[in-house]
Image: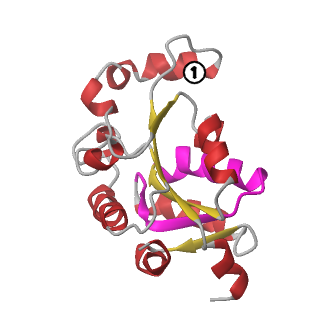
Amino acid sequence: MDERIKKMLSNPTLLVIDLQNVYSKGQKWECKNFDEVIKNIKLLLSNLKNNKVVFTRFKANQKPKGVWENYNMQNADVNSDKWLNNIADGVKQFSEKYPCYDKSVYSAYSIKSIREIAAESSCVVITGAVAECCVLSTVMSFIDAGVYVVYLKDAIASIDDKVKSATLNVLDGFAPLQINIMDTKEISDFMS
């Protein structure tokens, strides 16, 4: 690994985006790799040497405007189910240990506290759900703001393999200048 990348990984923040029960097996928005993602994120969280971890949770805006009105109408059943909107059972105990911020848009960068944490970090390590939606939006926002991103491809849930691959193909165009695509095994030395 080149020295520039090592420097970028010197003071990382782990961001767990919207890892909620609605994406678990058998649920309306099931992600096929959800169990693997939970396992990999738990491994990272269990072996951290620093406490720079942040969770986000998507919650529908109670007074939506524009396209979010349509979103709320189409997803009223999910929006009203408290359990589906909770952080996934497999990592919930960690979300109670670290800050967890609610958001009502796709990008976690919309949260002021997350922008401040990112500004104090050498990079943001991205995990969570869903690759082609909230994760992609967040990654692009961080890149636009000049924040280096590490995308953990085996710690990000996606609806299916085809969409996961398409998202990786898009992000690969930003590597390695603005993003590094890694897996949990590669990053563990830097975070544990």
Q: Say above or below: 111 vs 140.
A: above
Residue drawn at x 60%, y 73% is 9
Residue located 55% across and 10% down the image? 63
126 and 65: which is toward the camera:
126
Residue 15 in the image, given as x and y percentages of width and height: 50, 53
Circle 1: residue type:
Trp
Mark 1 lies on residue: 68
> Based on the displayed image, in which of its 4 quarters is residue 113 positioned?
top right
Question: Which quadrant of the view contains residue 96?
Answer: top left
How many callouts does the rendering have?
1
> What residue is rendered at 57% in x and 60% in y?
167
How far across and down, in percent of the image, does residue 172 sit?
Answer: 65, 70
Residue 143 in magenta? yes
Q: Is residue 49 above or below residue 31?
A: below
Q: Is residue 189 above or below residue 97?
A: below
User: Where does the C terminus fall, quadrant-wise?
Assistant: bottom left
Spot occupied by residue 149 in the image (x, y as percentages of width and height)? 64, 63
Residue 25: percent from left, percent from top: 23, 48
In this image, 26 relative to 187: left or right? left
Q: Quadrant of residue 79?
A: top left
In the image, residue 66 lies in the stretch drawn in magenta: no
| Residue 77 falls left or right of residue 144 | left
Q: Residue at x 54, y 45 (%)?
A: 133
Position of the N terminus, as image quadrant, is bottom right
Residue 119 left/right relative to 59 = right
Which segment did they paint magenta? 130-159
